[in-house]
Amino acid sequence: MTELDQNQMDNENLSMEDALKDVHEVKVGDIVKGEVLKIEDKQAIIGIEGTGVEGVVPAKELSTLPVEDINEVVKVGDELDLVVISTIGKDKENGSYLLSKRRLDAKKVWEDIEKEYEEGKIIEAPVTSTVKGGLVVDVGVRGFVPASMIDDHFVDDFSEYKGKTLQFKIMEIEPSENRLILSHKAVVEAEKAEQKKEVMANLHEGDVVKGKVARLTDFGAFVDLGGIDGLVHVSEISHSHVDKPSDVLSVGDEVEVKVLGVDPDRERISLSIKANLPGPWTDIAEKAAPGTVLEGTVKRLTSFGAFVEIFPGVEGLVHISQISHKHIATPHEVLAEGDKVKVKVLEVHPEDHRVALSIKALEEKPEEEHTEPEPDSYDMPEENTGFTMGDMIGDALKDNDDKDNQ
């Protein structure tokens, strides 16, 4: 053997020794780097860097999401960070190892989630599926949203949330048991609380704002002002009488309201719809000018007359003397509540909300029967003497008494 051949052999031995020094023993639990050598039978064959051995990554261990086509997840030549799950076969030196990318990714995800939980952060994730008890969410690991934590109102149909990306508050976390409980309701409530605070701070008595009818009750309508509801009492819905709010309003209606009062401590806001509407007495001087003939409804009868509604919310008085040409003791003799009557406007006073009406002004006056009065020495016109008949008779009696006493 020549000296050259000897030197070459020595160099090869040194290279092999160096290579063997670089080969590390693979143990279960180790985190290793590997190169995808080939893909076959729904698994990737991996060359584990620095070991001289190969490992296998089944499709289900490649991603935290379900893998339908392994070729869409990895390709030959990709370098991956993997964790050794177990050995395959008895020959540990040259045998294969079962590897996982999913578990390594999940470990990192759990660490990140634990940090976000400790810092009280809100996370965002898509809803991947629904189950009987709630929603399944993908945050890199499986998260669960119980039905009671989906929203701030009762949810009967979970399907409307599937596929949506929502924000969640982390309620409970236990990586060792793969348990992650999330709440979307907590996020919604926090947002509404902040909105309420902002609306209350910027709302003042007398403001006119727009809102949407959120709920209807027998006593009024609750209007959403953008995070907080205000109440429009039934008496503040319309200038005309409203029996039930549902008679004139529907949930979802957009309305303009005036703020009557704000109570920050009790988070109560009083609103009015009718305050922004033209009042029934608006332009009444034009609509009911003196001499105008209108049709109305008898609303109330009193001893001194009848109140007749001539426009919604506008009532005028027909004095008892203006009901009939004939003498009547009470309005009830000729009128009843609910009667439809024609009236003539005598006077209108918008500032006082008063209208004087007449029924008899539209009726023909009956002819009066005239009789000649019999001559009577005591029948003297009062307007000429300035005395009444009672005064005169009283004086005559007084004179007779004086004569008798003499």
Image: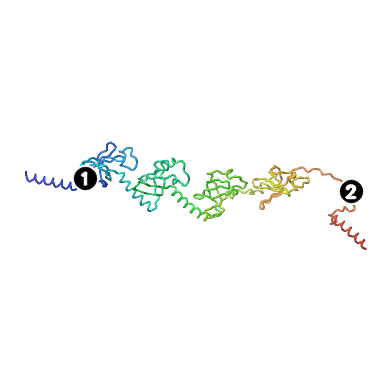
The image shows residue 26 at horizontal and vertical percentages of 23, 46
Q: In the image, which disc is placed on residue 51? A: 1
Mark 2 Cα within 10 Å, few/some/many (few <14, many 20+)? few
Taking depth in this image into account, of 372 and 238 the one nearest to the observer is 238
Q: Position of residue 285 (x, y in %)?
A: 67, 49
User: Around disc 1, counting alpha carbons within 10 Å, would you say few (fewer than 14), some (14 to 19), or many (20 or more)?
Assistant: some
Q: Nearer the viewer, residue 278 or 227?
A: 227
Seen from this angle, which residue lies furthest top? Answer: 41
In this view, the residue in front, 46 or 350, is 46
Q: Quadrant of the N terminus?
A: top left
Which residue type does callout 1 highlight? Thr
Q: Is residue 296 left or right of residue 263?
A: right
Where is mark 2, residue-wise?
A: 374
Q: Earlier in the sequence, mark 2 or mark 1?
A: 1
Amino acid type, label 2: Glu
- Secondary structure beneath disc 2? loop
Q: Compared with residue 38, is residue 356 higher up or lower down, i.e. above or below? A: below
Separation of residues labelled 2 and 1 (CA atoms): 148 Å
